[in-house]
Image (cartoon, grey):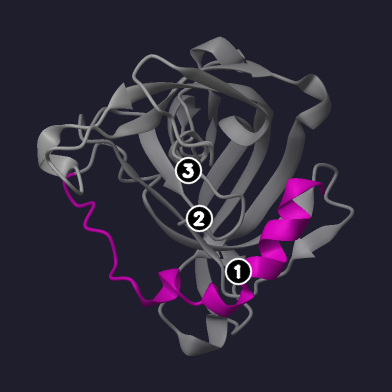
Amino acid sequence: MKKLAYIISAVCLLCMFTSCQEELDNWYSETFEYSGRFVFKLMSEDMSDTYIDYEGYEIQIYNTAENIQNNVWIDDHGLIFPLKSKFVFTGNASSFKSVTEDFAQLPENIHSTEDVPSVVPTAAGQTYTEEEQWYIKAAILEGKILPKAATTPGGNQADSIYMKIRLYSGAATFTSYEVPVALRADPEVPEYAWKFTSAVPNPEMEETYVIGGYRYTGMPEDM
């Protein structure tokens, strides 16, 4: 499982974080049928192995600021992959997938692009390439959310979710910029920071998983 195996062990103490969050308000969302909190288990691509089995982890799906049909955020709050990225789907909630699997056209994963190099830049315009940057982008290969199709661990009925997700990793390049005066520790001393500028995927680092689960019910027996 490569990178994921190391992340899981580091976040076990945080597994209940998202379950404490308030329900998202999606009443006026163009993506209402997708949107919500989903308790999930994480499986291998062929579903023969289960890496996380309903251990309190959640993934959230919600509309973008533009509130466009089939455009959503998928967010695991940094607890598993980590993943927070926009997705553009074709189809509808009962059968959907990303409109493309082309790395160049996929939105970046915010958690990955904000994981900047530890090397401190000394001027603007410098570049630095991380050869192994994990989970830069992601695509949903197939997915479905079905009303009242799941029976929760507590025996309650809930909407089910199934998503096959491919995570792309590779080399990421960052470019330095001068930090605005208002954001510096000392306004009189120039500071520089990194921002993500480009990436090249490495096929050997691709990982594909299946997310399966149910919409959050709020019942303690279901967590």
- Report how far apart the C-alphas of labels 2 and 1 lie in the structure: 9 Å
Earlier sequence position, callout 2 versus callout 1: 1
Residue 169 position, x and y percent, is 67, 29
Residue 47 position, x and y percent, is 83, 50
Q: Which amino acid does label 1 sit on?
A: Val
Q: Mark 3 points at which residue?
A: 111
In the structure shown, which secondary structural element does the residue marked by tag 3 occupy? helix
Bounds of the magenta segment: 1-28
Q: Residue furthest front?
A: 188
Q: Left or right: 155 with respect to 206?
A: left
Residue 2 position, x and y percent, is 81, 46
In the structure shown, which secondary structural element does the residue marked by tag 1 occupy? helix
Q: Mark 1 points at which residue?
A: 11
Q: Left or right: 70 with respect to 142?
A: left
Which quadrant: the C terminus? bottom right
In the structure shown, which secondary structural element does the residue marked by tag 2 occupy? loop
Disc 2 crowd rating (10 Å Cα; few below 14, some 14-19, many 20+) is some
Q: Which amino acid does label 3 sit on?
A: His
Q: Do the residues labelled 2 and 1 touch (CB within 8 Å)?
A: yes
Q: Do the residues labelled 3 and 2 touch (CB within 8 Å)?
A: yes
Residue in the picture at 59% in, 64% down: 150
Residue in the picture at 61% in, 57% down: 80
- Magenta run includes residue 2: yes
Q: Residue 78 carries which label?
A: 2
Residue 9 position, x and y percent, is 71, 68
Q: Which amino acid does label 2 sit on?
A: Gly
Q: How many labels does the image show?
A: 3
